């Protein structure tokens, strides 16, 4: 699950930089975030290395932050009338 979380996080980060592709990137980002959390919890219970899961978790979180930024920027530009 750590590898899946990392792959989904990277795909989400790439798509989150495109201004109006946020809806496409939001679903993999949320799934990657959930998989990363599950993997970190499972690995911490068994005292195994959890670097891949943390990387996927952070990539997914960064993607969600960028997606939220683009939604706020789009809403602000529509309300201002640009």
Image (tube, grey):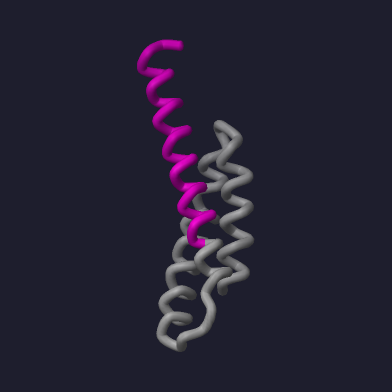
**In front here: 51 or 22?**
51
Picture coordinates of residue 65, whole percent (x, y)? 44, 44
Determine which quarter of the picture holds residue 18.
top right
Q: Is residue 34 above or below residue 18?
A: below
Q: Residue placed at 47% from the left, 57% from the top?
A: 30
Determine which quarter of the picture holds residue 2.
bottom right
Determine which quarter of the picture holds residue 3.
bottom right
**In front here: 79 or 52?**
52
Q: Residue placed at 41% from the left, 85% from the top?
A: 45
Left or right, residue 54 beside residue 14:
left
**In front here: 3 or 81?**
3
Q: Residue placed at 56% from the left, 45% from the top?
A: 24
Placement of the N terminus among the 4 image quadrants: bottom right
Picture coordinates of residue 11, whole percent (x, y)? 63, 52
Q: Which residues are magenta?
A: 57-82
Picture coordinates of residue 16, whole percent (x, y)? 56, 41
Q: Determine if the magenta segment contains residue 75.
A: yes
Q: Is residue 41 above or below residue 34?
A: below
Q: Main secondary structure of the magenta part?
A: helix
Picture coordinates of residue 49, whole percent (x, y)? 53, 79
Q: Residue placed at 52% from the left, 74% from the top?
A: 50
């Amino acid at each position: 699950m750590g590898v899946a979380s990392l792959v989904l996080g990277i795909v989400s980060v790439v798509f989150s930089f495109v201004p109006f592709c946020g809806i496409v990137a939001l679903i993999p980002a949320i799934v990657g975030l959930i998989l990363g959390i599950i993997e970190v919890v499972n690995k911490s219970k068994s005292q195994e290395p959890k670097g891949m899961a943390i990387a996927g978790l952070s990539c997914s979180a960064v993607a969600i932050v960028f997606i939220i930024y683009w939604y706020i920027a789009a809403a602000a530009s529509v309300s201002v009338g640009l």
